[in-house]
Amino acid sequence: MHQDMDEGSIRQRKESQNGSTGHNLDEQTKDESAAKATVLQKDVGLLSGICLIVGTMIGSGIFISPKSVLMYTGAVGPCLIVWAACGVLSTLGALCYAELGTMITKSGGEYPYFMEAFGPIVAYLYSWTTVMVLKPSSFAIITLSLAEYASTPFYPGCTPPSVVTKCLAAAAILLITTVNCLSVKLAAFVQNFLTAAKLLIIFVIVVAGIVMLAQGKTESLSNAFEGSSTSFGAIGLAFYNGLWAYDGWNQLNFITEELKNPFRNLPLAIIIGIPLVTVCYVMVNIAYFTVMTPADLLSSPAVAVTFGDRVLYPMSWIVPLFVAFSTFGAANGSCFTAGRLSYVASREGHMVEILSFISLKRYTPAPALIFNGIVAIFYIIPADINTLINYFSFAQWAFYGMAALSLIVMRFTRKHFNRPVKVPIVIPALMVLMSVYLVIAPIIDQPSMLYLYCVIFIFSGLILYFIFIYRKVKWARKITGPITTYLQLMMEVVPPEKID
């Protein structure tokens, strides 16, 4: 009964606002009596768009992954080439997403594109894998590296105990989820502030590196290609870890419905943001190699902290502090976009109903954010970061390749669609080939049951699809109905209007 009253009052408010649909994540009303309709507001401008891309891409990767990239390439020269190539690859991938995002202006990342190109089953499998694994595991990986950096200064000369890093990571997840549930304005402010902080620390590291180069410290850079690896799979794994540092270039596609003038701002944010990150990454790596030999870099538990100790002493404490800021910002960005996919998938009937509900008072997708946080905490408990990264990239790159494939498919099946941005068809073709390589190479190089489990998990979603979505069994409604009502009353959340 309470549920019906909530829905009714929300509906009346919406009808008074021209029957607007969706839900407002970005503004809480000043005057509660003249409440706004719960619609997604177009509040994200060009600068905020660039901040979201840069802020989510520059997280923990550049401060942790340089080790893995160097380990798989075996020498400084190929390591720097892989970093630059990853930047070019991310830009090409993001250009494909610019065409998709301006052609189908719906939020939810790849989900609406798969829905249009391949139909509901592929879109469902994507949302199932991303909501259950990719988004929360990404959140978990970022907070684990945040915890590793934050605790390192308290354990000089040794690695922090895993129980400490895991408890810190769980605390970070709870804090970030709470911030995102309380207010979108607060979450956006945190994101912008932390993006500025991370660009500042990268500037400091790069300037210190340039000073070192000017002093003639080029030992590591002189024999740059000595001992480089030639294994097909090892280069694939180097790209994996490099691309993990670049991951986040598709974040704007999760919030397309909230972009002001997406036809202009989506491609512009991509063209400005990603080359900026590429230049930062290559310069930071060169700076690392001015004061560390490859062996030093591989033995360091936290590369940027070691760099700070050698170059910025006695101000070296600023490095772990700012790296923690940077990682916190990336985790915040990841959490910020995670709710959008659950919302869109739930709107199409592909997810549990409660996940598409929004807070009546705060206009945030609280149930989706809380669910994402709980699953992320479960991912923290067992694994170390590198296992998670390889597992994460395997499934993620399969979806990136399918997004590029959907672009090629829709060139033939959806010729009538308006395309404000149109990339040469060779770019998505190259992305498809590259993603096939990135998915297959590590499996050939190091066959592992992990990959098989990943595939089984993805396709196990079909069982749920058949029972709950295709057949729509009645007993499921009887079980989920009371639970949904209870959670709705407890969290004070309401369903958004269906989009026609």
Image (cartoon, rainbow, N blue to C red):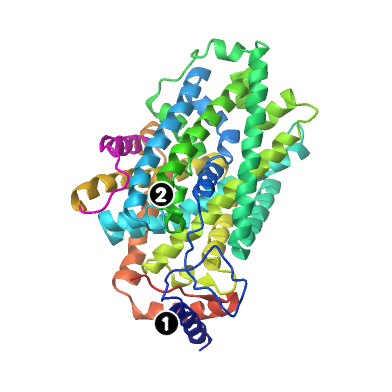
Instruction: Please give the name of the residue rendered at 61% of the width and 37% of the height, measured from the top-left corner.
Output: 199
| Label number found at residue 251 | none
The answer to whether residue 135 is left or right of residue 412 is: right
Please report the bounds of the magenta region as a residue range.
416-438
The answer to whether residue 243 is left or right of residue 377 is: left
Front residue of 173/389: it is 173
Q: Which residue is mark 2?
A: 454
Amino acid type shown at disc 2 = Cys
| Circle nearer the viewer, 1 or 2 | 1
Q: Which residue is mark 1?
A: 478
Amino acid type shown at disc 1 = Lys
- Badge 1: how crowded within 10 Å, few (<14), some, or many (20+)? few
Could you tell me residue 343's position as x and y percent? 45, 64
Q: Which of the image's four quarters has the C terminus? A: bottom left
Could you tell me residue 251's position as x and y percent? 47, 49
Secondary-structure class at tag 2 = helix
